[in-house]
């Protein structure tokens, strides 16, 4: 797919201009007139020629591309007004890519079960409840339904805005869990949480459509599918039940994903896979504003891939959907902190949530350590919002 990814954004320019004494109309014209730069990738020669035809000298790069060239990248200097004008004159993929540049910074508010999330106000926290014997960081601790419910109540007490209940580990090399066993693990926990926490949205972490459907009947209002709605039956569950969803980028399967992952452009690959999932959901009547997108940190990625995706999380805004990210206790944090084991990665996890907040990239973070993350985000979100 073609993607036009903004290389710089200055959300605080308006404040600086106000300080310099410009009135609202003048500020609007300056900000609208501001030249921005986007990296346009995935072009073939025909698309590059079409872009040059409308944008002229604003397009640079890919100068020696021949008529058979594909996978080209060019730079585009633009203003919001120009991107708007060019996108109207271009059809297909190129027009869509330029229209993405016009999307607002924050997605529309989203109702998930009993609660409506107003994105941009702060970073929301999803607490992880693993009802599994083998999850990578807490396997076996909450395998029993009573222990899982007790843990969930404690996470909400610590400040979780929503809870993600899972009955199958997705760690690299994990064994698949049969449908009946997965349902037996998660359904009693969801039923009890729906009764005991009626104001807290519940998410089901599953890639099985049948488990998702039963989980929604038991009280879940979000389907978190790490296989990005690959299974059309899962799209139907989300469409027919009207719940929210989360689509996550994953290369291969949990069993194979960490075997030498390689990408030409990891950010573009993530955008392609997630855009495809959003379109398949839209085709069944699920609007993209109801679907979280997630880059899938640690799912078929090296440390370098994870870091680049986090650094460029803002690019996921091009998808026009809320962004959810899970870095909590993951192995890349262990590698960055001298080989610490999963239970000693709490500070590193909270630091990653804080950085995501300040880079403006995540609407929801999925974490194991809710209290520590809420503290880190209280500081980071306040710095981001400072005026
Ligand atoms: N990570 C894990 C599981 N589910 N879902 C989303 N949307 N994003 C993630 O990053 C994500 C996820 C892995 O963490 P955990 O559940 O603690 O481990 P395990 O899969 O071993 O149970």
Image (tube, grey):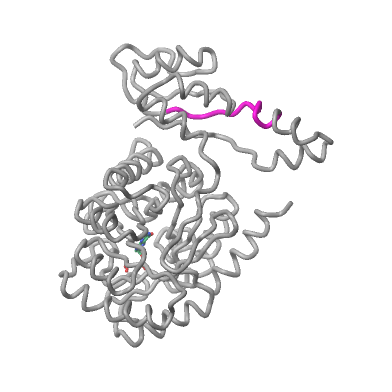
User: Considering only vertical position in the picture, is 333 above or below 3?
Assistant: below
Residue at point 28% right, 15% down? 68
Q: Is residue 269 visible?
A: yes
Q: Seen from this angle, which residue lies furthest right?
A: 21
Tell whether position 271 is magenta.
Answer: no
Magenta span: 30-40
Ligand 1 quarter of the rendering: bottom left
- The picture places residue 219, in percent across and down from the top left corner, at 33, 73
Please name whichever residue, 279 or 270, is drawn nearer the observer in this view of the structure.
279
- The picture places residue 98, in percent across and down from the top left corner, at 46, 28
Residue at point 29% right, 57% down? 238
* Drawn side of residue 315 relative to residue 45, left or right: right
Q: Is residue 141 visible?
A: no
- The picture places residue 85, in percent across and down from the top left corner, at 52, 22
Please tell me in which quadrant of the rendered image residue 179 appears: bottom left
* Drawn side of residue 180 relative to residue 104, left or right: left
């Amino acid at each position: 797919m073609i993607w036009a990814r903004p290389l710089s954004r200055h959300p605080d320019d308006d404040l600086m201009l106000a300080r310099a004494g410009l009135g609202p109309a003048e500020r609007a014209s300056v900000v609208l007139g501001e030249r921005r730069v986007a990296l346009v990738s995935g072009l073939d020669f025909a698309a590059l020629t079409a872009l040059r035809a409308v944008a002229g000298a604003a397009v640079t790069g890919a100068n020696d591309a021949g008529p058979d060239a594909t996978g080209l990248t060019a730079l585009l200097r633009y203003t919001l007004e120009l991107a708007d004008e060019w996108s109207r004159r271009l059809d297909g993929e190129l027009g869509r890519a330029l229209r993405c540049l016009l999307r607002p910074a924050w997605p529309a508010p989203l109702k998930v079960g009993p609660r409506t999330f107003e994105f941009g106000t702060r970073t929301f926290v999803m607490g992880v409840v693993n009802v599994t014997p083998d999850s990578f960081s807490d396997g076996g601790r909450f395998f029993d339904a009573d222990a899982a419910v007790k843990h969930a109540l404690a996470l909400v007490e610590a400040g979780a805005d929503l809870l993600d209940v899972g009955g199958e580990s997705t760690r690299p090399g994990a064994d698949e869990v049969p449908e009946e066993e997965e349902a037996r693990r998660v359904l009693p926990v969801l039923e009890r949480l729906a009764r005991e926490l009626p104001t807290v949205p519940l998410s089901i972490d599953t890639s099985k459509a049948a488990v998702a459907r039963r989980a929604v009947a038991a009280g879940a209002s979000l389907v978190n599918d790490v296989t990005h709605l690959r299974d059309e039956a899962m799209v139907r569950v989300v469409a027919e039940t009207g719940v929210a969803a989360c689509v996550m980028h994953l290369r291969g399967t949990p069993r194979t994903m960490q075997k030498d992952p390689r990408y030409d452009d990891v950010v573009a690959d993530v955008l392609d896979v997630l855009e495809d999932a959003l379109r398949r959901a839209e085709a069944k009547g699920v609007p993209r504003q109801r679907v979280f997108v997630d880059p899938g940190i640690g799912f078929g990625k090296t440390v370098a891939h994870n870091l680049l995706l986090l650094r460029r999380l803002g690019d996921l805004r091009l998808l026009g959907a809320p962004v959810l990210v899970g870095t909590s206790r993951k192995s890349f944090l262990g590698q960055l902190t001298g080989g610490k084991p999963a239970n000693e990665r709490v500070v590193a996890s909270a630091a990653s949530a804080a950085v995501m907040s300040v880079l403006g990239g995540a609407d929801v973070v999925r974490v194991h350590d809710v209290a520590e993350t809420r503290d880190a985000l209280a500081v980071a979100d306040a710095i981001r919002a400072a005026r």
